[in-house]
Image: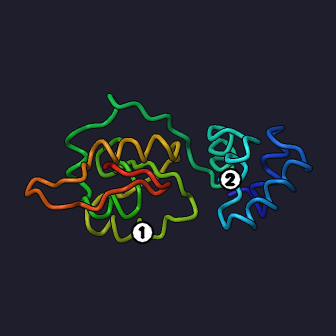
Amino acid sequence: MIKNQRIGQLLIDKGYLTPAELELGLAHQRNANIKLGESLIELGLITPDQLNDALGDQYEMPVVELYPDMLSEELWGVLPESEVIRHRIIPIFRDESILHIVTYDPNNLDFIPALEKMTGFRIEAALADRQAIEAILLRRFSTRDRTGGETGVSGGDGLSAA
């Protein structure tokens, strides 16, 4: 991780944001009670790609652009559905004993050791666009499961599959 570099300063250093725009984003963040990156995107001050680029640098994580044809049916069965939904993750690649997943929240990776124990794979995380992850999860897990019951899947950003 970049030593003590806050995301706002990193966005400024990368030329994506001015100090004045950061102040606007911080004010909106406080008022809306959301993460700074979400605030800056809502205000149109940065793009999701710019946020992911900065977060990738900050957390030393690769950034992946998701395409539907890159998702393997086999990999969906490796992780428990409940964990995929709870942590908003997508398995994208398996390389021998390593399972590669994507997430949009690098601050929320505490679940990885439990998943490694559950699956027997070492898990490596990369970042991907939040909307892309949510759209794939919504397509994958409809509002009805195979028995006709509700799965409770809805997007973390207010999207729902209904």
Q: Quadrant of residue 69?
A: top left
Q: Along the polypeptide, which appears first: circle 2 or circle 1?
A: 2
- Label 2 SS: helix
Q: Which mark is residue 63?
A: none
Quadrant containing the N terminus in the rendered view: bottom right
Q: Quadrant of residue 46?
A: top right
Q: Circle 2 sits on which residue?
A: 37
Q: Which residue is at the far front?
A: 162
Q: Where in the figure is residue 103, as x and y percent of width and height?
A: 47, 52
Residue at horizontal 56 percent and vertical 58 percent from the top:
106
Q: CA distance from mark 2 to mark 1?
A: 22 Å
Residue at horizontal 62 percent and vertical 44 percent from the top:
52
Residue at horizontal 52 percent and vertical 65 percent from the top:
108
Q: Which mark is residue 111?
A: 1
Q: Where in the figure is residue 72, as x and y percent of width and height?
A: 26, 37
Q: Quadrant of residue 86?
A: bottom left
Near mark 2 (Cα within 10 A), the count class, few <14, some 14-19 or many ≥20, is many
Q: Where in the figure is residue 43, as x and y percent of width and height?
A: 73, 46
Q: How many marks?
A: 2
**Amino acid type assigned to the residue bearing label 1 in the image:** Phe
Depth check: give the residue in front, 75 or 43.
43
Question: Is residue 41 left or right of 20 when viewed as pictured?
Answer: left
Depth check: give the residue in front, 105 or 124.
105
Whether 51 is drawn above or below 85: the answer is above
Near mark 1 (Cα within 10 A), the count class, few <14, some 14-19 or many ≥20, is few
Q: Where in the figure is residue 84, as x and y percent of width and height?
A: 33, 57
